Image (spheres, coloured by chain):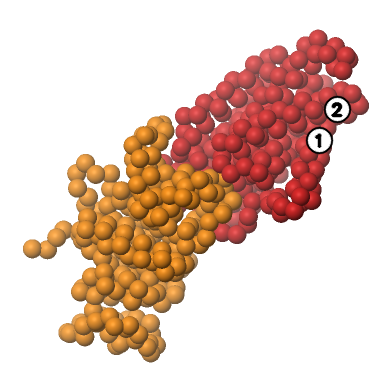
Chain colours: A orange, B red
């Protein structure tokens, strides 16, 4: 029995100018998936995620969500670069607390229980002692954890992370890995990454996108497929990660 | 000092002081958003566009304050509803609003038969001309701005800080943006009475810029800007009274002097204060 997808893109095409950046993309996110989105720079990874998040409206095709009744259907998003101005006068705790923005009415202030959850999330991401620091005073890796904490606090149905390991130090990476494994017990996680090996043990499926999307259930990845996507020879570096060799592989690959 | 207290026995001076305090409170409340969200150009545009409404009202013998409010709110709604990502040049649209508003205002004032109001009064403000009736309108406008912020503080801060995240959270970003711009528009109209169209943006930006050098959370920046703004306005009025200076420029120049002094003091002490918000993404 196949799970019904929580979120599904159907024949989605979108671009910023005249040329589509993503074209005729189908992608389904099932409960408890751990999906890695890979592909070359400019291949449409971030664009695809923004479409799934509803930040961009596709030219054609649709995004369909099926969240359980009584749930708000919030999505968690950890952008690669902070989408805000770090000189804004806010402390770390206030930024993270914005994860609770959508959980109650707009007119309600943050509540005691919001703050209790805030304290728990800060502790979980090892940010408690930075709670009162200004957002411009912390390091890149710490800021990354702040963004993750904010998304986690919103109690999302699906968590999207754009290059979460890019600016993160070894210690943060450990914290992040444990957190993602833990979260993945209840929600699906979608990670855009250049460095699939850093999260490889958790990855169940891989979506390769370079305008078109190739979906690989079971995290299978091989040289030929990567070359197809990237359009040039790629050296596989595995660092001891077991990649199953692809079996039958029928795709309508566009010409490069 | 004696003569200053004497001055307060005139209704004109009392009205001026009250209008100044109202304006300063609004600057403190709205200014930090203008500075951190980089809406100074937009605020200036609304201020100049509002002059169009004032001119038209003059021509038809209506209260110019009404025209200013109508145009300022119109600008706030229009700019708030525009999709900033879809527009190639948001700046240019503000620039057009600015110039067209000013031109319309000047044409209508020029064509107004009989008594021609002094343009300088509107461009540079004359707080001593604020009537009791206007003071009442200003108080209502100020009350509305404070009410909007009090009700929607959480959402407005979130949208001002990170629009993308607010949208992902399902917050009504468009509505909140319109509310923020409405607050700015109403404040601008009030400030026009105090410092005039051209100097509005300085009163909005100087107090928060000073506070942002020291303070780390928004609530303290707002509170600090309110206090600084009140000091700036009352100090400027005093200077204007004592040395027979035009009130608007006196207020702004006092503020600018304080900003410069604070910046230099901080620099001398070895700190390297950031004069303006960091421009890196």
**Local crowd size for mark 2, using a 10 Å CA cut-off: few (<14), some (14–19), many (≥20):** some
Which quadrant of the view contains residue B98?
A: top right
From the viewer's side, name the closer residue of B227 and A227: B227
| Residue A241 position in % (x across, y down) | 27, 80
From the viewer's side, name the closer residue of A22 and B259: B259
Q: Residue at x 41, y 66 (%)?
A: A171
The quarter in which the C terminus of chain A is drawn is bottom left
State whether residue B277 appears in this view.
yes
Residue, disc 2? B239
Q: Is residue B265 above or below residue B204?
A: below
Q: CA distance from mark 2 to mark 1?
A: 9 Å
State whether residue B167 appears in this view.
no
First-in-chain label (2 vs 1): 2
Q: Is residue B222 left or right of residue A176?
A: right
| Residue A243 position in % (x across, y down) | 24, 82
SS category of the residue bearing label 2: helix
Q: Is residue A15 above or below residue A6?
A: below
| Residue B222 position in % (x across, y down) | 60, 35
Q: Residue at x 38, y 55 (%)?
A: A125
Q: Are marks 2 and 1 in contact (CB under 8 Å)?
A: yes
Q: Which mark is residue B254?
A: 1
Residue lying furthest right in this view?
B243
Disc 2 and disc 1 on one polypeptide chain: yes
């Amino acid at each position: 029995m196949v799970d019904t997808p929580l979120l599904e893109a159907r024949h989605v095409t979108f671009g910023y100018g005249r040329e589509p950046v993503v074209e005729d993309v189908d992608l389904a996110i099932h409960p408890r998936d751990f999906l890695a989105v890979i592909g070359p720079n400019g291949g449409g990874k971030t664009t695809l995620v923004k479409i799934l998040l509803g930040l961009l409206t596709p030219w054609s095709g649709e995004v369909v969500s099926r969240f359980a009744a009584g749930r708000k259907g919030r999505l968690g998003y950890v952008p690669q670069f902070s989408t805000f101005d770090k000189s804004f006068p806010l402390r770390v705790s206030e930024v993270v607390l914005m994860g609770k923005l959508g959980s109650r009415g707009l007119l309600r202030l943050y509540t005691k229980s919001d703050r209790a959850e805030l304290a728990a999330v800060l502790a979980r991401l090892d940010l408690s002692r930075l709670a009162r620091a200004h957002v411009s005073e912390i390091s890149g890796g710490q800021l990354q954890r702040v963004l993750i904490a904010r998304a986690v606090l919103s109690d999302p149905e699906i968590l999207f992370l754009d290059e979460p390991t890019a600016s993160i130090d070894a210690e943060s990476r450990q914290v992040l890995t444990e957190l993602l494994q833990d979260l993945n017990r209840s929600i699906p996680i979608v990670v855009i990454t250049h460095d699939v090996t850093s999260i490889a043990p958790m990855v169940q499926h891989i979506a390769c996108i370079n305008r078109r999307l190739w979906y690989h259930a079971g995290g299978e990845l091989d040289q030929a497929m990567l070359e197809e996507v990237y359009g040039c020879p790629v050296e596989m570096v595995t660092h001891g990660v077991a990649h199953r060799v692809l079996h039958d592989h029928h795709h309508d690959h566009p010409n490069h | 000092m004696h003569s200053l207290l004497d001055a307060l026995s005139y209704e004109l001076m009392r009205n001026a002081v009250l209008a100044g305090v109202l304006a300063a409170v609004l600057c403190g409340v709205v200014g930090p958003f203008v500075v951190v969200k980089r809406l100074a150009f937009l605020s200036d545009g609304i201020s100049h566009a509002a002059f169009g409404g004032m001119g038209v009202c003059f021509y038809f013998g209506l209260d110019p304050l009404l025209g200013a409010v109508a145009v300022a709110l119109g600008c706030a709604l229009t700019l708030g509803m525009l999709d900033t990502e879809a527009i190639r040049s948001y700046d240019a649209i503000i620039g057009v609003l600015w110039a067209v508003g000013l031109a319309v205002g000047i044409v209508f004032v020029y064509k107004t038969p009989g008594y021609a109001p002094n343009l300088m009064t509107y461009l540079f403000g004359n707080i001593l001309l604020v009537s009791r009736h206007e003071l009442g309108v200003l108080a209502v406008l100020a009350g509305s701005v404070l009410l909007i912020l009090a009700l929607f503080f959480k959402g407005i801060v979130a949208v001002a800080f990170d629009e993308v995240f607010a949208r992902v959270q399902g917050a009504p970003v468009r509505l909140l943006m319109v509310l923020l711009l409405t607050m700015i528009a109403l404040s601008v109209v009030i400030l026009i009475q105090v410092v005039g169209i051209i100097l509005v943006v300085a009163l909005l930006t100087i107090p928060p810029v000073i506070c942002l050098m020291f303070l780390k959370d928004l609530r303290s920046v707002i509170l600090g800007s309110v206090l600084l703004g009140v000091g700036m306005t009352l100090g400027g009025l005093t200077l204007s009274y004592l040395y027979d200076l035009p009130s608007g420029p006196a207020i702004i120049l006092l503020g600018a002097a304080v900003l410069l002094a604070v910046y230099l003091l901080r620099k001398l002490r070895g700190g390297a204060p950031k004069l303006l918000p960091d421009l890196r993404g």
